[in-house]
Image (spheres, helix red, strand yellow):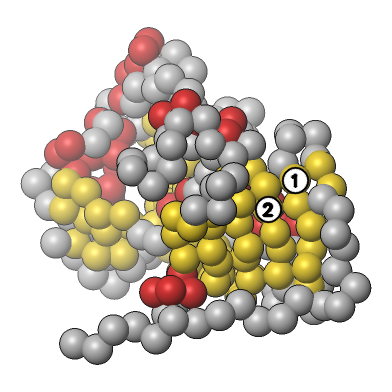
């Protein structure tokens, strides 16, 4: 197998600023080339070329050396990247100086990044990829919810044309979840990829609810606390005794 061909950063503009701008969070940046495309949002996925180095100029990572760009959801990386990449347009280039608390903190990252390290990155934003959105709803989809004996509420937003899963099946879905106050606590759409799991290993409201929709369909669930995370909640995202709301598309039954 041949080795990858190392690539190099494309040129920055001649009048690129020498000084860094510092944001309220402590992130420092300078735009070396303005892009002519849109700036990404935190919920977008991006495709980039980059290299990263430490204060002593030790390079710890480089997509240029690997010979291919990398794509990832902005919500799935260190805070300094999530914030910094929203400051440059598609086609642009940015240099980031990321303090430890917006990077890998006191733990560092393996052998490459020591604890409490300031990180430096040169990044070219090649493409902004908006997250997928839920598919269409049936024109005659019911507005009212049906309540089951357990207390689960549901309404079919789009009829599927396949079979319905059993509790012992593994399903592949796209979904988003929110609380009564409309705070979104999770979204596979935001991550830009579907998720698969066995139906008998999730909260009871999902196990029951997903058996009510067919493959290719979409269902909205309103899950009472006792069929969700109960009095314990899920620290960091779901408070105790919370009612959970989900919109789910059933992509595949395995």
Label 1–label 2 contact, CB within 8 A: yes
Q: Is residue 132 visible?
A: no
Q: Earlier in the sequence, mark 1 or mark 2?
A: 1
Residue at 19% of width from left, 62% of height from top? 253
**Numbered disc total:** 2
The one nearer the camera, 214 or 247, is 247
In the image, residue 124 sits, relative to residue 86, either above or below, namely: below
Q: For the N terminus, which image quadrant? A: bottom left
In the image, residue 43 sits, relative to residue 221, either above or below, namely: below
Which mark, residue 96? 2
Q: Is residue 206 left or right of residue 236?
A: left
Residue at 19% of width from left, 44% of height from top? 199
The one nearer the camera, 162 or 83, is 83
In the image, residue 29 sits, relative to residue 131, either above or below, namely: above
The one nearer the camera, 61 or 218, is 61
Residue at 50% of width from left, 48% of height from top? 77
């Amino acid at each position: 197998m041949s080795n990858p061909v190392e690539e190099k950063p494309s040129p920055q503009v001649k009048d690129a600023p020498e000084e860094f701008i510092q944001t309220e969070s402590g992130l420092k940046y300078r735009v070396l080339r303005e892009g002519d495309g849109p700036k990404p949002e935190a919920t977008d996925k991006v495709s980039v070329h980059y290299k990263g180095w430490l204060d002593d100029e030790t390079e710890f990572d480089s997509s240029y050396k690997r010979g291919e760009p990398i794509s990832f959801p902005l919500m799935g990386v260190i805070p300094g990247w999530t914030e910094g990449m929203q400051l440059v347009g598609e086609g642009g280039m940015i240099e980031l100086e990321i303090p430890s608390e917006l990077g890998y903190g006191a733990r560092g990252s393996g052998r490459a990044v020591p604890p409490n390290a300031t990180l430096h990155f040169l990044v070219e934003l090649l493409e902004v990829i908006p997250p997928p959105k839920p598919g269409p709803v049936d024109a005659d989809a019911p507005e009212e919810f049906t309540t089951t004996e357990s207390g689960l509420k549901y309404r079919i937003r789009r009829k599927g044309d396949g079979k319905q899963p059993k509790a012992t099946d593994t399903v592949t879905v796209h979904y988003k979840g929110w609380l009564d106050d409309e705070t979104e606590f999770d979204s596979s759409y935001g991550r830009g990829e579907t998720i698969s799991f066995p139906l008998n290993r999730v909260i009871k409201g999902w196990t029951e609810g997903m058996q009510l929709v067919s493959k290719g369909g979409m269902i909205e669930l309103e899950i009472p606390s006792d069929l969700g995370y109960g009095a314990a909640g899920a620290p960091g995202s779901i408070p105790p005794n919370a009612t959970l709301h989900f919109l789910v598309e059933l992509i595949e039954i395995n």
